[in-house]
Structure formats: C-alpha cells, structure tokens
Image (spheres, helix red, strand yellow):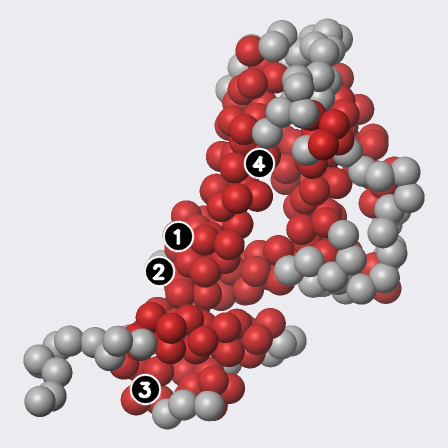
C-alpha cells in the first residue's frame, strides 16, 4: 500500500542532509553564491524537481545550509558563553585565537557564503543574521557580561562592547581569507590581535583582573599556544 498523500519517505531527513552537504560544497566554490537552482541540483546529482521537493526554492537550499552551520556551531558558542574564565586579558585573547582557528577550519567559509548570498536579499540576509552572525555576537555578549560582573570591565552596553570586540577581527579574517588579502596585502594576525585586545581594554577595562575560574586553563580561554599550528585546515 502506498504512503498517505503528503507523507514523507522514512529517509527524508537523511537524504535532505546529504543534499545540503553537497550544495554547500558548490556554494563554497569561487562562483558558488551565484549558482542557480539548476546548478545546485546538478552539483548534488539530482534533478531540479527533486531539489525542489526537499527545499522548495534556491533560497530554501541556502537557508538549509545556514541552519546546518547553526546546529554545528552550538557547542562552540556555548563554550564561549559559559566556559570557565581566565583573567580578562587572557580570556579575550583566547577568544580571538578561537575565532581565528574557526575561520581556518570552515567558519570563514560559511560567513562568506552568508554575506555573499544575504546582502540585499530580504530572506537570506535575516537568515544569515539569525543563524550565524547574531548567535556569535550573543555568546560574546554573555562572556563579556560575566567579566563585567567580575569587575574586570566597566558597566555599559554589552552589545556595543561585543561589536567593538568582534567587528575588527571579523573584517581582518575575511580580508585575509575569503577576500584573498593574505596574498595581496598580508597582515600579521597575532600582532593585530594583541594590539586589538590592548585597545579594547583601554576603552572598556577597569584595570582589575579576577583570578581564573576552575578549569579555565583547559578551556579555549587558555589562549593561543606558544607555537601556533601551521599547515592544513584540519590541524588544531
């Protein structure tokens, strides 16, 4: 007996997930954000009708890719928001190391896709904000609020503080990575990151550093290793 009208195949979600992964690879190519719905279907090895069955439209496919990255990023964002704290300077420098490491391991790619597909797009722009960019800012806001409560940062608008902390490194990482700046106009990341934290603490710091919380040395807040990894993206 056939399935009731409107019901889904038992493997619907698994098939949908495999299609998302295939389309993401296409979107990651240099011309990927401009790929048509037909080109996305071809890259996934299915017909346009099949892709439409699972996602409805081109916007639906890109939205699914952004949602996938939202799900994958939750545990990392939770670590930023709730992980044990080092004194504020080391804690924030550790966050920038964590951010740069993420960009080298695929996070920069999804931001590039989100920006390329979302700018001036009434559906995908807000989707990128809600699924990718704003969750990043919100977890930083939570971490800064905890440093504020410890007396290490001045009382103020934590959202503005998060933007002040994240926006310059975000632009630098896009500049050096997806935009090709590492070849055309290279910048020394560690020097930039150290000077950026100095400037941030001059603007928002109190001069007080609270002691590390238990377990902080083992968290990402332990900051960059003395010898940073070199080589392929899979190194950590």
Real-space Cα separation, disc 2 to disc 3, in angstroms:
22 Å
Q: Is residue 73 above or below residue 197?
A: below
| Residue denoted by label 2 | 123
Percent x, y of residue 115: 54, 59
> Which callout, 2 or 4, points at the residue further toward the start of the chain?
4
| Residue denoted by label 3 | 50
The reply to whether the C-beta atoms of the residues labelled 1 and 2 are less than 8 Å apart is yes
Quadrant including the N terminus: bottom left
Q: Nearer the viewer, residue 223 or 166?
A: 223
| Residue denoted by label 1 | 126
> Could one spot residue 155 in this view of the protein?
yes
Real-space Cα separation, disc 2 to disc 4, in angstroms:
29 Å
Point out which mark residue 192 bears: none
Q: Residues within 10 Å of mark 4 (few under 14, many from 20)?
A: some
Q: Residues within 10 Å of mark 2 (few under 14, many from 20)?
A: some
Q: Is residue 163 above or below residue 13?
A: above
Horizontal arrangement in the rendering, residue 8 relative to residue 14 (left or right):
left
Q: Residue at x 72, y 32 (%)?
A: 218
């Amino acid at each position: 007996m056939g399935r009731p009208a409107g019901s889904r195949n038992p493997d619907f979600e698994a098939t949908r997930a495999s299609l998302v992964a295939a389309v993401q690879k296409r979107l990651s190519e240099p011309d990927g954000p401009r790929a048509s719905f037909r080109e996305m279907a071809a890259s996934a090895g299915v017909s346009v009708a099949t892709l439409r069955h699972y996602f409805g439209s081109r916007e639906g496919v890109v939205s699914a890719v952004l949602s996938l990255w939202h799900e994958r990023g939750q545990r990392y964002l939770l670590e930023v928001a709730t992980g044990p704290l080092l004194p504020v300077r080391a804690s924030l420098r550790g966050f920038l190391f964590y951010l740069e490491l993420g960009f080298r391991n695929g996070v920069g790619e999804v931001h590039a896709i989100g920006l390329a597909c979302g700018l001036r797009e009434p559906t995908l722009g807000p989707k990128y904000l809600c699924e990718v960019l704003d969750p990043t800012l919100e977890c930083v806001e939570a971490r800064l609020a905890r440093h504020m409560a410890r007396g290490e940062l001045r009382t103020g608008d934590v959202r503005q503080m998060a933007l002040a902390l994240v926006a310059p490194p975000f632009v630098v990482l896009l500049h050096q990575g997806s935009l090709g700046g590492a070849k055309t106009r290279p910048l020394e990341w560690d020097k930039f990151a150290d000077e950026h934290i100095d400037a941030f603490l001059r603007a928002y710091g109190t001069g007080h550093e609270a002691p590390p919380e238990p377990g902080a040395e083992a968290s990402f807040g332990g900051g960059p290793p003395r010898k940073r990894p070199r080589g392929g993206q899979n190194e950590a």
